[in-house]
Image: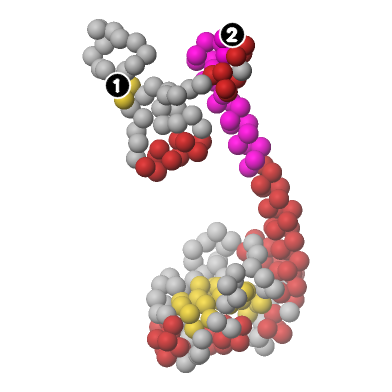
Amino acid sequence: SPCGNSVQEMWASMVQGRSGIARLTRFEDPNLSVAAAGEVKNFDSESLLGRKAGRRMGLFMQYAVVAADQAMEMAGSEFVAAVKYYGLSWLPARKHVEEALAAAADAHPSGKIIKLPCYCPWKEHLFELEEEKGADPKPLYALYEDDKGAWRIQAIPLTPSSFENRKPLPAAWRGVRDAELDKVSGIDGCIFVHAAGFIGGNKTYEGALAMAAKALEMD
């Protein structure tokens, strides 16, 4: 494209605000009312296609072949990434969620808080398992450890893709952090609660559990 001859080059140009439009260099026509266009620049057909293939094709065909090669390479890499995600992350997560749902009463007597053994793609699995097993009551909060060793408390949404939650974290906590949140909540080790009330954090599992338990009783 006028902004670059690879996905990486084109993206970099877009991020930096380069339009790719410049003065015409390939031909001149006094009958044209414009002198600028989006020409493909620095296109080296020999390095991309080989000397023989480059000579046999017109320029428009060279562009088409190189673009198709890049598209297939990109699609292939995305396919491999998707297979790895589903095989190594999404599918194993179902067992984690199933065990957490079965042990909800161990995490909290209400059965409305689940403890995941690690962060994983849990939402779709939870909704499927709730329906399969007739979960009652349905959990309102999920607890899991983040990559820094702190614990998150996340409100469970109405649907896997919903921005609305079954029970958001208390309004009084939203947008508050650290020592001020400790004071407002009466729980030590608080890190934050998002302004939308869908997620919060505490330095320890015990603190996150205390936040979830207290949130069950608050608006």
Q: Residue 80 versus residue 112: which sits nearer the camera? A: 80
Element on which disc 2 rests: helix
Q: Where is 163 relative to 143, above or below?
A: above
> Which residue corresponds to the image point at 41% horizontal and 27% vertical from the top-left?
2
The magenta stretch spans which residues? Answer: 54-78
> Which residue corresponds to the image point at 73% horizontal and 69% vertical from the top-left?
96
Q: Residue 116 versus residue 40: which sits nearer the camera? A: 40
> Which residue corresponds to the image point at 51% horizontal and 21% vertical from the top-left?
44
Q: Residue 127 versus residue 142: which sits nearer the camera? A: 142
Say which mark, if any, is on residue 23: 1
Whether the magenta-drawn stretch holds residue 33 is answered as: no
Judged left or right of residue 101, residue 3 is: left
The reply to whether residue 114 is visible in this rendering is: yes
Residue 177 spot, x, y in % from top left: 42, 80
Q: Which image quadrant is residue 104 in?
A: bottom right
The reply to whether residue 140 is visible in this rendering is: no
Color encoding of the figure: secondary structure
